[in-house]
Every structure is written in C-alpha cells, then in structure tokens.
Image (cartoon, rainbow, N blue to C red):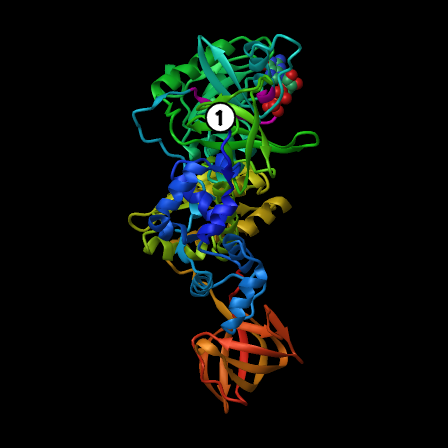
Amino acid sequence: METMAKVSVQELAKEFEVPSNRLLQVLTELGVPADAAKSGIDQETADTLREMATDLGDELRTIVLPPQITVRELAQTLERTPTEVQKVLMGEGHLFTLTQKLEKELAELVVSEFGLTARWQEPQAQAVVAPKAKKALKTAGMQPRPPVVTILGHVDHGKTSLLDYIRKTKVTEREFGGITQHIGAYQVETDGKLITFLDTPGHAAFTAMRARGAQVTDIAVLVVAADDGVMPQTIEAINHAKNAGVVLMVAINKIDKPEANVEKVRQMLTEYELVPEDWGGKTIMVPVSAITGEGVDKLLEMILLVAEVEDYQADPSAPVEGTVIEAKLDKGRGPLATVLIQQGTLKRSDIINVGNTMGKVRAMLDHKGNQLDKAGPATPVEIIGLQNVPLAGDRLTVASGESMARQIAQERQNAEREEKFKHQQKKKLKLEDVYRHLESDQFKELAVIIKGDVWGSVEAIRDAVMNIEPPENIDILVVHAGVGNVNESDVQLASVANAVILAFNVKVEPKAEAIAKSDGIDVRSYKIIYELLNDIEKALRGLLEPEYEEVYCGTAEIRAVFKLSRGITVAGSYVLDGKIYRGYNARLIREGEVVYDGKVASLRHIKEDVREIAAGYECGINLDDFTAYKVGDKIECYQVRQKELD
Ligand code: GDP
C-alpha cells in the first residue's frame, strides 16, 4: 500500500502563522483526534485546511486564555519564549517576572502584538469544588446501577470483620493464583445483582470526602455490637449519615456472643430516631454475626431491596464522571488511584483529568486484579497512568485530547489556588456573625455541635439549647451532641454542616484545632452552662457585635513622584519606621492632615513587586485610587483586625 507523505502539525501551524496547540484544538473540534494529528496530517486534510484557511483564520487566530494567566503560561500558549513576551511588556513600560499574573488588558495587548486575538474563558471554579450530591437528571440512557454502600460504626464493633466476611464469601477469586487486592472498594454479586462496598470503614474517610464536596455513598450500614450497644462513635456515625442524607440501615453484630442483647440495642437506637420496622418505624435492622456469617445474606438482601425502592440509576453513555476513593504512590507502577465511576463508561487509553492532575488510562484493574477495557457506573477500578497522586474525593473526567487535558489541569490548579486564597479570607460561620447572616436570609438555621465532659451535662445543654426561643423563622439545629474532646470528626462535621462547635469542659484536640483554624470553624469553649446559653441568645438577637482594633505598621515619606505610562503614578518613598505592607490600609498625611485613607495597592523595591518593605529602604508605593502625591507627604500603613474574643 502506498503511504502518503504527511505534513506535521508544526509545519502547518507555521504556514498559517498560528500556535500549533491552537491548530490541534481546532482540528479536534473538526473531528480529527489530537493523538492522530500528532503523528502528522495527510496531504488531503492539509489541503482542505488550506482551502478553509481564510474561513478558519479567525478561529485559528483566536487564543482561548484562562481568566488568570502568568507571563510564563502566556508564553507557553503563544509558543513563544518568555523573554519575547517580557520584551513586549517592557515596550509598554512594564517589568514582569515569569510567575507574575497579567491583567486582562495587558495579556490582550501581548496577544495582539503576535497577530492573534484573545478570548477569555469563563472561570471554572466548579472544576475543583465538586457539585453537591444530586440526583442525576433522568435521561434516555439511564439504567439501574448497583448501590454504593459504606460501613460505619464504633471502633471494635466489627466493621472490618463484616467487610472481610462479605468479601471472602461473596467475591469469587480469580482461578489461577489470583489474589483479591485491597483497592478501597469491591463489588459482590448476590442473586445476580451487584453491590459496591467501599471498604475503608469508619466515618473519618466518609466525612473527609464529603468535606471535599464528594458524595459517593447511597447506603450507610451502621454496625452496632450487640454486646456493647450504642457508643460515642455510633452516635457520631448516625449524625454523619443523617447529615449526608444517605439511607441508614443497622447491622446488629456479634449475635453469636452469649452476652449479645439485640433487643437492648434496638431500644437504645430509638433514642436517635432509629426505630425498627416491626415497632412501626422505618429503619431496617438486621442481626448478624461477622464471624459465623449468620444474617449476612439477609443484610445483603435488604441492601438490594433498598436499592430497588430508591431506584439508583446512571447513564453509561453519558460523559464520564468519577470520584477518587483512595490513591497512593506505588514504587513500581507510579501513582495509583481507585476511582468509583458514577456516570458514563471509562475506557482504556482515555485521557483523563483527576483533581488537578492528569494522565492516560494505561491500565484499569478491578478488585480481583482483572484487567478491564472499560468500566461503567458504580464500578470501582484502580487506574494506572496518572502523572501525580490525587486526593480522595477528587473528581475524574475524560478530556478530548492531551492538550485539552493539560489546559483543564492548569485551570484546576489555578482555580484551586484561588479557592485556597479565598478560603483563607472567607470566614465560616462565627457566633457573632450569626445575626447578620440570619438577617440577610443566608442562614435560616443556627447549627451547633455540642461536646461535653459527661453525658449529663451534654444532655442538659442540648435540651437547654433546643428550648431557646429563637426569633421568628429561625431554627436552632443540634447537628451532633457527644461526650469527649472536640476531635477531627467534629470539626469535619461542623465544616460540612456549617455549624458552630460548643465545647463544655473539654479540650480541643491539636489536630482538630489545626483543621478548625485552617477551615475557619468557630470552636467556643465554656466552663459555665449559663454563659454558653447566653452567648447563643445574644448571637441570635444580634447583640454579639465584633470589636475591631487598629494596629499601626509603619510610616514612609515621599521623596519623589514618578509618572509612568498608562496614567500610573508612583510615590518614590523612604520607610522611616516599622514596615509598609502591600494590601494593608494606608493614610496619606500632608502637613498633619489626613488627605487620603485607603489601601496600599502595590509596593515595589528596585522594580520588583514586594509584599512588605522595612524601615531604612526605598520603595515605590502606589495607593489604591490615588495619584496626587507630593514630595514630603507621609504614608502611614495600618491594619484593621477583629479583636479576639475571649
Ligand atoms: P472494627 O474496629 O469495627 O473494624 O472491628 P473489627 O472488625 O476489627 O472487630 C473487633 C473485634 O471484634 C475483633 O476481635 C473481631 O474478631 C471481633 N468480632 C467482630 N465481629 C464479630 C462477631 O460477629 N462475633 C464475634 N464473636 N466477634 C466479632
């Protein structure tokens, strides 16, 4: 067969005077896969493109840019060296470092300097913050899918044993020396129907994922040991499951033990609104033994029954959506991620984005170690071929090609950075903000978590809190009440439920404190119940006003005024004492009078942007919205911060 000579994308891009990546994108849009195009384009296609070049010209010459772009990224997109881009900027009177972000206007100017036009992409913050659990819209392709089950419960009540028993007895091992491997999830077949179990027991994993916005579980099986009954983590698990809105079933375990008392457990559970069906309630409760296996079949049957009633569905032909269950770095195989596919069908060789990393599905294994070519909804698979190790809770999507995947990964990294920055600035619900939020209709309820040293006081506080008469249309919701120190799990629950934690006579564990700090969760410690209740009442009625204080930072004197191009004026200054900080408040004082009060918009030291500058140094200061500087003016920098409440 005669092989036709091929034209490389690079050559063609040169001919059209456009970046080759843009040409690749346009080719993908025209139906030529990027992978195929990379090995060259046949003459016929090339000729068609040439004919279309005039029509395509505009499209080819339009570069799509993410909302935030640095000099280096822009250079990459334009397929120019960073120096070339910097030169253009210098021509306009700007000195930029490679990692500095460009204002839209400037980026557009650079792009046009290279004969191209810029189009701005919509910010895609949702690329990182996954959508909240939602019932998928029913489309024509919808089909029933297996339920996804998580096992929760108090330590030592038998979660691991139950998961092991089900796996050992219900998963058929591979025939030739295959070993079931732990990949974080497995599927069992019973009565010809599949059930997917997430096999990292415990609500820590469950809540950690939810805290990242991912919800993969349909049914939570709460394991309660019949010889021990309801314990602190049983209550935590109930509250976590309720908060997540998943179906909660109970497995009363260890019934083989002589001291087992199933009735007592059922009785204890009614206190948490879990009432068995034969007592007129709605909660399915199955007595089981993870050791003898008694009742396990019945439990699986009940799970399938719930699945039938709830009618879980997914569309195997929809665009692929998945969530990382767990991930690790393997010495031999590189980054490994177990992903639960939720919509669509993932195929081998697909180019994927996972969280802010990307890769190609080089191999896909199920929990039995079988190689799969494709995986549909509710299937857990281990994926080999990612560039980096993602996090549990990260979303998986399929990209149309490598350049697209790279672009999405970049966007997600940018969005994540932004999100982190915003997160640091944004405060979660604080008690003193409650009234304002309630007033502005943002919160119709005040959610609280109560932790205390003994059950008696926890109960007393819970009852008293619930007896507070809130202003009209406002609910007080006790998300969780328990005995013991404030732990990680409490803080995670507070984060997902947007709750305030009230700690009575207990400590905050260091790890919990660290998370609370970084997530901005309000944890309040009390020693007197009256004070605790008083604070809530005051908060509800808007009396707990935050107090602010001003902190002096430093003063600079203006020694020269520079007018730059584009109407920018800079005050060449000398720092007399303290420090000047970019972004902080500042006053301009002229002959003892305050003539300006605003912010330090930018701060430069020898042409470099700096965050702060100390006494004894010269710097260029640019105040927000101000240009009328005069030599001899003083700039006083200060910070306004909320007074710590004690
Ligand atoms: P987890 O902390 O909830 O995962 O609990 P494990 O599965 O590790 O079980 C704790 C202990 O209880 C182990 O010694 C198990 O062997 C035992 N155990 C678990 N289930 C049963 C059961 O049904 N019957 C009896 N007799 N012991 C059990």
- Residue 513 location, x and y as percent? 59, 48
- Residue 384 location, x and y as percent? 59, 29
Give the residue drawn at x 58%, y 63%: 83
> Which stretch appears magenta?
146-160
Q: Which quadrant of the figure has residue 447?
A: top left
The three-letter amino acid code for the residue at tag 1 is: Lys
Could you say whether the residue bearing mark 1 is in a helix, strand or loop?
A: strand
Return the residue at label 1: 347
Q: Nearer the viewer, residue 128 or 528?
A: 128
**Which quadrant of the figure shows ligand 1?**
top right
Q: Is residue 569 above or below residue 436?
A: below
Q: Nearer the viewer, residue 383 or 342?
A: 383
Q: Indicate left or right for 439 with 503 as reference.
A: left
Q: Indicate left or right for 437 with 338 as reference.
A: left
Q: Is residue 388 above or below residue 158?
A: below
- Residue 358 location, x and y as percent? 54, 39
Give the residue drawn at x 47%, y 46%: 12
Q: Is residue 433 above or below residue 200?
A: below
User: Does the beta carbon at disc 1 come under 8 Å from ligand 1?
Assistant: no
